[in-house]
Image (cartoon, helix red, strand yellow):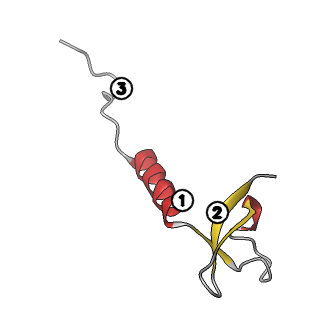
Amino acid sequence: MPLIDAYRKSDGRKVRVPAHWIGHPDPGLDRFSKTPRQKAAEKAASQKAQAPTNTPAAGDKKE
């Protein structure tokens, strides 16, 4: 089970927790948030996945 860095929501201290605790539906385990670096990496990955591609439409011919 991989451990990741996270911040406690109650006091802001940095701790190492199992990855599956982040965003867990159990209110007792929803005490942690991701680090700013993790949030930025996820945001960049989602923006990259949504970026338009420059592929030609079907039927276009290269002249």
Label for residue 27?
Answer: none
How many marks on residues?
A: 3
Structural distance between the alpha carbons of marks 1 and 3 = 38 Å
**Which residue in the protein does label 2 denote?**
5
Is 25 on the left-hand or right-hand side of 50? right
Name the residue rendered at 41%, 52% in the picture. 47
Type of amino acid under label 2: Asp
Up the image or down, 63 lies above or below 10; here it is above
Label 2: state its secondary structure.
Answer: strand
- Percent x, y for residue 31? 70, 80
Is 29 on the left-hand or right-hand side of 23? right
Within 10 Å of disc 2 (Cα), the crowding (few <14, some 14-19, many 20+) is: some
Q: Nearer the viewer, mark 1 or mark 3?
A: 1
Type of amino acid under label 1: Gln
Type of amino acid under label 3: Ala
Label for residue 38?
Answer: 1
Q: Nearer the viewer, mark 2 or mark 1?
A: 2
Up the image or down, 49 lies above or below 15; here it is above
Within 10 Å of disc 3 (Cα), the crowding (few <14, some 14-19, many 20+) is: few
Could you tell me if the residues under marks 2 and 1 are in contact, i.e. CB atoms within 8 Å? yes
Structural distance between the alpha carbons of marks 2 and 3 = 45 Å
Q: Identify which residue, 53 or 61, lies in the foreground.
A: 53
Could you tell me if the residues under marks 2 and 3 are in contact, i.e. CB atoms within 8 Å? no
Label for residue 58?
Answer: 3
Question: What is the residue that sits farthest to the bottom in this orientation?
Answer: 10
Structural distance between the alpha carbons of marks 2 and 1 = 9 Å
Q: Identify which residue, 9 or 25, lies in the foreground.
A: 9
Name the residue rendered at 72%, 78% in the picture. 30
